[in-house]
Image (cartoon, rainbow, N blue to C red):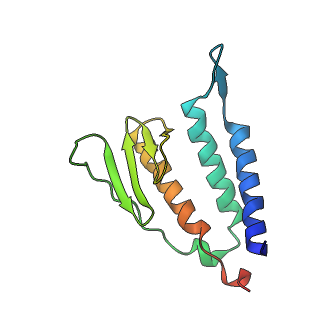
Amino acid sequence: MTAIQKAREAQIERVSAILMEHLEIDFDGEDAFIRADSMETAVIAAIAALDAETEGSASINAIAVKPLEWVVPKSGYGQEAYSILGKYWVLHGQFWSPGCTVSKPCRDDAAAKAAAQADFESRIRSALVPPEARS
């Protein structure tokens, strides 16, 4: 495992810990479920932590990621945005990311679009390596 892979694995563990710290899990007697408003809070906290962690890497943060361009699909349901990663889709305050069959609930469509953009940017940035880390 390379140093970059080890650093990424450690980063995933830190983000998972942040997410679990902010998620509110309710029980209805039989099943557990995550409250939608806590999911948004958790994702925002994790993104902020990642931003703070990579703040020193100006070369990666200096790169702007193209915003997703939302359009109404022919079906008329929700809005979608196509990216190099695939299609993002927003409907009723939820978003689906490329390759994902489970929605991520948010407060409303605007929050869902913001969360989709954050997901898109984090996926793009996860593939970038700052010059100082290249070997």
Whole-percent x, y for residue 21 in the image: 73, 39
Q: Quadrant of the N terminus?
A: bottom right
Q: Residue at x 45, y 46 (%)?
A: 96
Q: Quadrant of the C terminus?
A: bottom right
Q: Is residue 33 left or right of residue 97?
A: right
Q: Is residue 112 left or right of residue 53?
A: left
Whole-percent x, y for residue 52 in the image: 69, 61
Q: Is residue 51 left or right of residue 77?
A: right
Q: Is residue 12 left or right of residue 68?
A: right
**Quadrant position of residue 110:** top left
Whole-percent x, y for residue 10 in the image: 78, 60
Whole-percent x, y for residue 108 in the image: 42, 36
**Quadrant position of residue 131:** bottom right
Determine whether 109 is above or below 46 in the image: above
Q: State the residue in front, 6 or 119.
A: 6
Q: Residue at x 74, y 73 (%)?
A: 4
Determine whether 61 is above or below 120 in the image: below
Q: Residue at x 52, y 55 (%)?
A: 118
Q: Which residue is outermost to the top?
A: 29
Count every numbered label the image shows and give the total: 0
Determine whether 126 is above or below 119 in the image: below
Q: Which residue is outermost to the bottom?
A: 135
Q: Residue at x 75, y 61 (%)?
A: 9
